[in-house]
Amino acid sequence: MLTFLSFLLFTAFVAFYATWKLRRDNLKTQDGYFLGGRSLTGVVIAGSLLLTNISTEHLVGMNGSSYKNGAIIIAWEVTSALALVIAALYFAPRYLKMGLTTIPEFLEKRFDGATRTIVAMLLIISFTVTLLPIVLYTGALNIEAIFRISELLDVSRSQGIWITILVVGGIGAVYAIFGGLKMVAYTDTINGFGLLIAGLLVPVIALWSIGKGNILDGLAEVFEKDPSKFNVMSREPGIGPGSRSAILPFEVLFTGLMINQLYFWAMHQSIIQRALGAVSLKEAQKGLLYTGVLKILIPLVIVLPGLIGFYYFDNSLYDDPDSVYPMLVKKVLPFWLTGFFVAVMMGAILSTFNSALNSAATVFSLDLYKRYINRNTGELKLVRTGKWVSAVLGVLAIGIAPFVENAPQGLYQLLQQLNGIFFIPIASVILAGFLFPKVSAVGAKAGLLFGLVFYVLTYFIFQVDLHFVHIWGLEFLLNILIMHFVSLWYPRKNTFVIKDRGVLNVTPWKYAVPLSFALVFITITIYILLGNV
């Protein structure tokens, strides 16, 4: 009863606080609903970015992977700091000068309307088919494991997971539909810092217990169990036999991984939309770089508990690594904290879910509906359309979610493999738009189509003996070459120049460069210190 009460109180507080903060906001305008009125500050952006990114597919999936495969999985997190540096120093100033609301909007300015439309449709498909269902399923899995919904309701485990998916998906859709980006951002900020506190409590309490009152002794004991688990440099093969089942060979950091990270943190609509909603460039850069700091720290929440799980459970859960984190939480957290933890966990699920819904609705409303269905639509009608799209996509994601069960290498690995279908082709086109002025609209579409087909054929159909992240790197290079080659036959007809629309203040933050250098230094240091354990 106490567990349920603490869960209810924290969840109600988050909803009340966000609603109170929005009481004077106008959510009936395009900028008000889709970009939070361009009023977001650095701290709010950072909290929202963290929660939009970190959800139960990280808490469950990455801890499950670190339990089984060791700290090599940390690469997904710490290299994010490098991508956030590039996003803050290069991309954010250009996006905000152009006054963008969506990333496809840039593609129309740089190439043409058809490129914008194709990318907009790919974004909506990727949100609905990959991200949203996996977020919902992993969230339901974790809540079921900790709360035992099936036992409380006297139903089967699969029915308990279904019910949880329906409830969480429904609440998330309500947030996204009625509050817009600003509601999402405020709830994210509170839940984000709640997640850091609750997430850190799990390893801290576990290490305190293992070390009999001394956290460092506990860490030393976990380390001694299997020191190789702490090594961040994987010796797995990236090419040839065994490469397809490898988790994260070290050399992929220099091929496709950074392209993926750059796309996610500098070009992915659900992420960069927070920066687009900033009150100024200064606050956008603060938000992106503060997030870089958090991404350096977050392995303590989504990697270290998996290593502690190996200390407790040995290799007994190798066949079911996604159950490790829920079991660890139940083992170490006192019962009176469980409700708060589940509330924060639910906040993390809601954040990623409603952020993706809001972004999908933004892309559909501005990049598809306003262009092809009703060009003269007013802002109020546009906002209503966004709400309807959020509702429909929410229902679709809830329907797909239960079918992602039994991913052979874990749910987080499945998400990354599926993301490759969409991320790299879109990243290729956006980067070509900024870096290669000779690439034409026809060349961009050719590269986009080639990239989609190439990844599906090489990874899923012919199953080439290459790690999927290597395929991303190869695909990116080929996409750029194809775009240049086609552009020789169909050259650009005009020159693209970024113009300052004067939407907001684009004066850079004076500490952006020093903090960026610090983040790069820390990232390299982590690999030097933990690369030879």
Image (cartoon, rainbow, N blue to C red):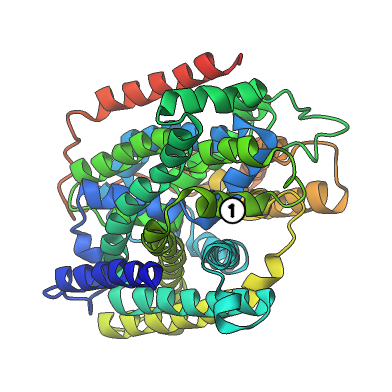
Q: Is residue 430 left or right of residue 252?
A: left
Q: Is residue 203 left or right of residue 406?
A: left
Q: 417 above or below 178?
A: above
**Residue drawn at (76%, 30%) of the image:** 238
Q: Is residue 453 left or right of residue 435?
A: right
**Residue drawn at (66%, 22%) of the image:** 228
Let me know if residue 109 appears in the view: no
Q: Which amino acid lies under the numbered mark 1 shown in the image of this protein? A: Met
Q: Secondary structure at mark 1?
A: helix
The location of residue 41, given as percent across then percent down, is 19, 51
Residue under label 1, please give it: 327
Q: Quadrant of the N terminus?
A: bottom left
The location of residue 326, given as percent across then percent down, is 56, 55
**52 or 363, nearer to the observer:** 52
Q: 133 above or below 228?
A: below
The quarter holding residue 39 reads bottom left
